Image: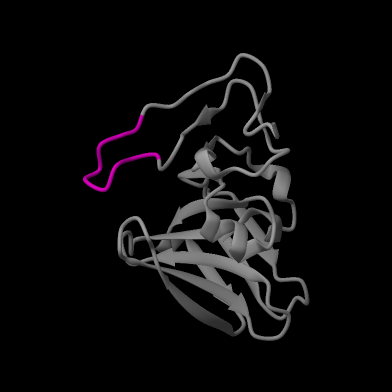
């Protein structure tokens, strides 16, 4: 039996349910995710698209990635504006769910940090967690090399 986890937007008009464990959960520090959230990074859990059920009406905003040239789609509540999920032209078989929207966001650990080259001042990267200067893989699918710190590390220090 697969575990079921649920979540919602801020106002509760959009709810979702996922079956099973995420493929990965990561924090993305790219400028797009910073602007998307109005914060330092976006934490998302990636699932096969068929593992996710969404109830309620979402609006969609498409943004062309500066890196791949393909679209990233932000799905957000029409009423409160909460970004509930992301889908990707490049990976149509996956849906990223906003970790903070889960009823219990701590049920899954963040397994990596990506695009740390654009992390904001004050962000601390954890020890023993895969960190990537940019994406986890190149545009041709070649895996990037992860950095693992032995102690918490400031992503960027103000000089």
Is the residue 104 above or below the residue 159 in the image? below
Q: Position of residue 60 (x, y in %)?
A: 50, 80
Exactly how many numbered labels are in the figure?
A: 0
Q: Which residues are magenta?
A: 136-144
Residue 109 occupies which quadrant of the picture?
Answer: top right
Q: Position of residue 148 (x, y in %)?
A: 53, 21
Q: Is residue 15 visible?
A: yes
Q: Nearer the viewer, residue 66 or 89?
A: 66
The answer to whether residue 63 is magenta is no
- Residue at 51 percent across and 31 percent down: it is 131
- Residue at 70 percent across and 34 percent down: it is 158
Q: Residue furthest left?
A: 140
- Residue at 64 percent across and 55 percent down: it is 5
Q: Is residue 19 visible?
A: no
Secondary structure character of the magenta stretch overall: loop
Is the residue 128 above or below the residue 139 in the image? above
Q: Position of residue 7 (x, y in %)?
A: 68, 63
Q: Position of residue 156 (x, y in %)?
A: 63, 34
Q: Nearer the viewer, residue 103 or 83?
A: 83
The answer to whether residue 137 is magenta is yes
The answer to whether 75 appears left or right of 13 in the picture is left
């Amino acid at each position: 039996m697969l575990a079921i986890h649920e979540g919602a937007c801020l106002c509760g008009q959009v709810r979702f349910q996922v079956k099973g464990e995420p493929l990965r959960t990561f924090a993305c520090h790219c400028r797009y995710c910073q602007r998307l959230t109005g914060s330092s990074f976006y934490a998302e859990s990636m699932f096969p698209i068929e593992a996710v059920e969404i109830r309620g009406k979402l609006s969609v905003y498409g943004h062309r990635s500066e890196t791949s040239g393909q679209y990233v789609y932000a799905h957000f509540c029409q009423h409160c504006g909460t970004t509930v999920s992301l889908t990707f032209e490049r990976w149509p078989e996956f849906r990223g769910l906003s970790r903070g929207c889960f009823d219990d966001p701590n049920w899954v650990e963040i397994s990596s940090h990506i695009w740390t080259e654009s992390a904001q001042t004050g962000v601390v990267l954890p020890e023993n967690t895969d960190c990537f200067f940019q994406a986890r893989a190149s545009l041709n699918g070649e895996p990037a090399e992860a950095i693992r710190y032995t102690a918490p590390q400031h992503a960027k220090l103000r000089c």
